[in-house]
Image (cartoon, rainbow, N blue to C red):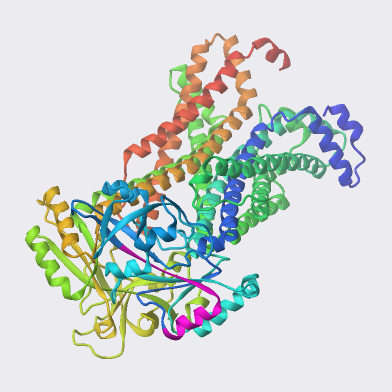
């Protein structure tokens, strides 16, 4: 808008109507979006990340819920460990509708020649399986295949060198592979699997001899309700309440098709929250670019603002006009971000949808749209109110001379209060939308600290550059002068680059520490094998075989049962809302044991251990951290359902457990008089001597399998390697997501260069007139960028290392390992961004012709 146009449009000094403000703002925008491109890009990037994460999460969750019946295998399921449903419990379930019974357990599949074996997830099913969903197999009809054989995952056949039609041994039975699995409908609803799936009939399962009293087998009952009982959410809720009342002491875990796997739902929600936080970080880092864009916008309209004020426009009028323009640009950025964010899940599901265990149900995600829009508008307001508030206070005369004598003023009190209100709303929105309010609050406080720290660092660098003695080399003297110049790049670059780089360093160092924990400590501190389901009577023979095959091996055993927490301090666990990090212990069944001594890998921290001949009321030792999360203390009671019986124990002591040692440890350890009489098997670890050969290692596993068909041998190294592969993919995804923050920092850097471009071009023109060559100007600019990047990187590495240390030591409770390689990679990436964007900016400066700029000045 020209100054003359502004004069024609301005009313008198009365209160300006909003319609006139809007008209003036829209007329101003007729000249185009110049100066707002970085603004729009910064807002759009953050909103796109938040929206895409939310939309994809909602699509997966929506598909999860809509396919709940197929995923669960029915309308409702009842599951418990060890004990098969019988008597009145079975009769009650059968009376409610059509029922399908399944049993799952871990076992070993072996070649008949005994040369190879593999851990499998064995699933025994009845003739009605599956009640819902479609089981796809290749080679034969499912019912016919399991009548006298098995249906196996093709991965198992590849591992054992078998093909359809071949025979293998499972437990005491020799079974032929009749078909292979293509798709299993209820795989997600089952527990976490460690081996390939093998289907057998319940009759074949009984023939294997694996199901004995105390075996770790999970019995599951899928129920298809009559239409009137399962067609609505209210009817399902009513049915679950009736089921809890009828099966009070049965110890069943109940799930329904509305949420077929609460663990998966919680994982999706936590992943959504984590990635949303990363998107918010990118948005906040991009907010610096928003502030730079507003500063550039105001700088380019100095003459217009000056004319408007000279003709009687009030400060509030100027503020209102430009605030409307900024909000319009923010809305445009939000719309672009929403469009990109909603398109990303569609693209990903089209490209990789077949790799997902559930089909994503794409729909217009209101929650994602509201979340992305709210974050975008709030961040835009947070970073624009302050510069707009300062602009309204500057007089026309100062605006005309601001190029050479910028005036630093504070906004009016109402603008400062409004800025604080927007910041408080942003924090409150982030906290209220999070699953864990405590973690969200810590995240917001951490971001606030990062911004304050790097803002202060930018001011310190700017202050120091103004006072440090100038070197005699002209290029370096000019570079230091630019660092200390008002309106330069220092503060913006330090803040944006520092925030993004510190996040990347923190993620990289946390990743390095976890990898070191997994790979560095295993050989010296961990067992070689876990052996499951050892019958108590066979343990002496197992120990003798191990000692004979590999002399010097250490064998440690512990009783092993599974039970489900029913009550804590007399309250049903269904009414307890623990923090997210402790929720898992209340969901499903947990491993239980009993002991007359403190288990290896545990340390007593509160209370006393019971005597070896203790015969009083049931006592239990609880893991310390989980006890504190659940509000438990010595003297409190916990009730656990084991084998269909409720057992209430009083907490006698608390233990600190070193889980990473992989010793035999449990959340709850009972006094022997509590569980000793219950039917159970043993769990053992085998630690081979260091000098044991790989051949002896492999031979021991084969001999154990041939001699004791019912036991399951799990090689610890294989399990850790499998976990490590998954962990590496997760950390790579986190690093990529963290890289979005650095991308936002790059946009801010581009905006900062645009902000300083006019001053830099004029400076370069004057230097050229005075005889400076392009080489000297180029060297001075790159020296400036290098000093900025070095100062920022040094503090970003320190802050990122501190954040990683706190997360690793105090949250993950493992040793912190500082690794230079990931830090160096992050530094190279940051320096590369500065060099690329700085190079583009310098090229534009060097291309500028002197005459037009000298004339305009």
The residue depicted at 73 percent of the width and 52 percent of the height is: 414
**Looking at the image, can residue 803 be seen?**
yes
**Percent x, y of residue 255:** 51, 70
In the foreground, 627 or 85: 85
Query: Which quadrant: the N terminus?
Result: top right
Query: Is 831 part of what is drawn in magenta?
Result: no
Q: Is residue 803 above or below residue 704?
A: above
Q: Find residue 172 and report its image quarter.
A: bottom left
Range of residues picked out in magenta? 87-106
Q: Is residue 487 left or right of residue 150?
A: right
Query: Is 96 part of what is drawn in magenta?
Result: yes
Q: Is residue 424 left or right of residue 616?
A: right
**Percent x, y of residue 92:** 50, 82
Q: Find residue 109 and report its image quarter.
A: bottom left
**Percent x, y of residue 696:** 12, 52
Query: Which quadrant: the C terminus?
Result: top right
Q: Is residue 450 above or below residue 772?
A: below
Q: Find residue 745 and report its image quarter.
A: top right
């Amino acid at each position: 808008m020209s100054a003359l146009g502004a004069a024609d449009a301005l009313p008198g000094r009365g209160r300006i109507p909003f319609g006139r403000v809007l008209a003036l703002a829209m007329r101003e925008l007729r000249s185009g979006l110049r100066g707002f491109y970085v603004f729009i890009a910064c807002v759009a990037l953050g909103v796109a990340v938040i929206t895409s994460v939310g939309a994809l999460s909602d699509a997966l969750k929506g598909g999860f819920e809509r396919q709940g019946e197929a995923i669960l295998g029915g309308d409702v399921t009842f599951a418990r460990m060890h004990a098969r449903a019988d008597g009145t419990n079975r009769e009650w379930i059968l009376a409610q509708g059509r029922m399908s019974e399944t049993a799952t357990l871990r076992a070993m599949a072996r070649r008949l020649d005994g040369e190879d074996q593999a851990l499998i997830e064995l699933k025994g099913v009845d003739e009605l399986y599956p009640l819902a969903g479609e089981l796809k197999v290749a080679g034969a009809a499912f019912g016919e295949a399991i009548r006298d054989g098995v249906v196996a995952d093709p991965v198992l056949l590849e591992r054992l060198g078998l093909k359809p039609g071949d025979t293998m041994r499972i437990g005491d039975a020799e079974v032929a592979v009749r078909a292979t699995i293509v798709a299993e409908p209820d795989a997600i609803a089952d527990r976490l699997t460690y081996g390939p799936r093998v289907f057998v009939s319940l009759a074949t399962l009984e023939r294997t001899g694996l199901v004995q009293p105390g075996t770790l087998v999970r019995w599951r009952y899928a129920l298809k309700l009559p239409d009137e009982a399962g067609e609505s959410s209210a009817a399902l809720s009513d049915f679950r309440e009736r089921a809890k009342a009828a099966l009070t002491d049965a110890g069943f875990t109940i799930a329904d098709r509305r949420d077929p796997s609460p663990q998966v739902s919680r994982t999706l929600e936590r992943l959504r929250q984590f990635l949303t936080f990363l998107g918010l970080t990118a948005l906040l880092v991009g907010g610096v670019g928003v502030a730079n864009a507003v500063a550039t916008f105001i700088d380019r309209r100095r003459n217009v603002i000056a004319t408007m004020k000279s003709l009687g426009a009030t400060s509030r009028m100027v503020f209102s006009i430009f605030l409307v323009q900024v909000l319009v640009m923010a809305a445009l950025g939000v719309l672009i971000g929403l469009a990109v964010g909603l398109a990303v899940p569609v693209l990903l599901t089209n490209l990789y949808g077949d790799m997902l265990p559930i089909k994503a149900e794409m729909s217009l995600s209101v929650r994602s749209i509201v979340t992305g829009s709210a974050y975008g508008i709030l961040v835009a307001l947070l970073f624009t109110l302050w510069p707009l508030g300062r602009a309204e206070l500057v007089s026309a005369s100062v605006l005309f001379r601001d190029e050479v004598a910028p005036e630093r003023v504070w906004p009016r009190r109402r603008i400062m209060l409004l800025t604080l209100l927007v910041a408080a709303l942003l924090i409150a929105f982030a906290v209220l939308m999070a699953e864990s309010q405590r973690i969200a609050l810590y995240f917001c406080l951490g971001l606030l600290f990062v911004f304050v720290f790097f803002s202060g660092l930018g001011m310190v660098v700017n202050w120091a550059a103004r006072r440090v003695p100038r070197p005699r080399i002209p290029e370096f003297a000019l570079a230091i002068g630019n660092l200390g110049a008002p309106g330069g790049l220092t503060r913006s670059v330090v803040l944006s680059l520092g925030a993004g780089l510190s996040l990347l360093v923190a993620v990289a160092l946390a990743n390095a520490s976890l990898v070191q924990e997994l790979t560095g400590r295993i050989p010296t501190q961990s067992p070689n094998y876990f052996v499951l389901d050892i019958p108590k009577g066979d343990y002496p023979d197992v120990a003798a075989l191990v000692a004979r095959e590999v002399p010097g091996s250490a064998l440690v055993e512990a009783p092993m049962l599974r039970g489900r927490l029913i009550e804590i301090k007399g309250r049903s666990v269904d009414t307890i809302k623990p923090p997210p990090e402790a929720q898992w212990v209340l969901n499903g069944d947990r491993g239980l044991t009993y002991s007359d001594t403190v288990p290896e890998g545990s340390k007593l921290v509160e209370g006393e251990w019971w005597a070896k001949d203790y015969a009083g009321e049931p006592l239990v030792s609880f893991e310390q951290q989980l006890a504190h999360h659940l509000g438990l203390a010595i003297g409190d009671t916990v009730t656990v359902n084991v084998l269909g019986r409720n057992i209430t124990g009083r907490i006698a002591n608390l233990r600190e457990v070193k889980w990473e040692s992989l010793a035999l440890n449990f959340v709850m350890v009972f006094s022997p008089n509590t569980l000793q009489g219950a039917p159970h098997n043993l769990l053992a670890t085998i630690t081979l001597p260091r000098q044991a050969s790989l051949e002896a290692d492999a031979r021991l596993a084969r001999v154990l399998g041939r001699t004791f068909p019912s036991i399951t041998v799990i090689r610890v190294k294989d399990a850790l390697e499998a976990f490590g592969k998954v962990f590496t993919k997760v950390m790579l995804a986190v690093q990529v997501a963290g890289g979005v923050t650095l991308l936002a920092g790059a946009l801010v850097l581009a905006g900062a260069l645009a902000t300083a471009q006019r001053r830099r071009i004029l400076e370069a023109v004057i230097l050229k007139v005075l005889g400076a060559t392009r080489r000297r100007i180029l060297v001075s600019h790159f020296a400036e960028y290098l000093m900025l990047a070095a100062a920022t990187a040094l503090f970003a590495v320190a802050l990122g290392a501190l954040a990683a240390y706190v997360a690793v030591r105090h949250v993950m409770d493992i040793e912190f390992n500082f690794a230079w390689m990931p830090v160096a990679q992050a530094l190279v990436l940051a320096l590369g961004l500065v060099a690329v964007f700085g190079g583009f900016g310098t090229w534009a400066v060097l291309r500028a012709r002197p005459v037009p700029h000298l004339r305009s000045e």
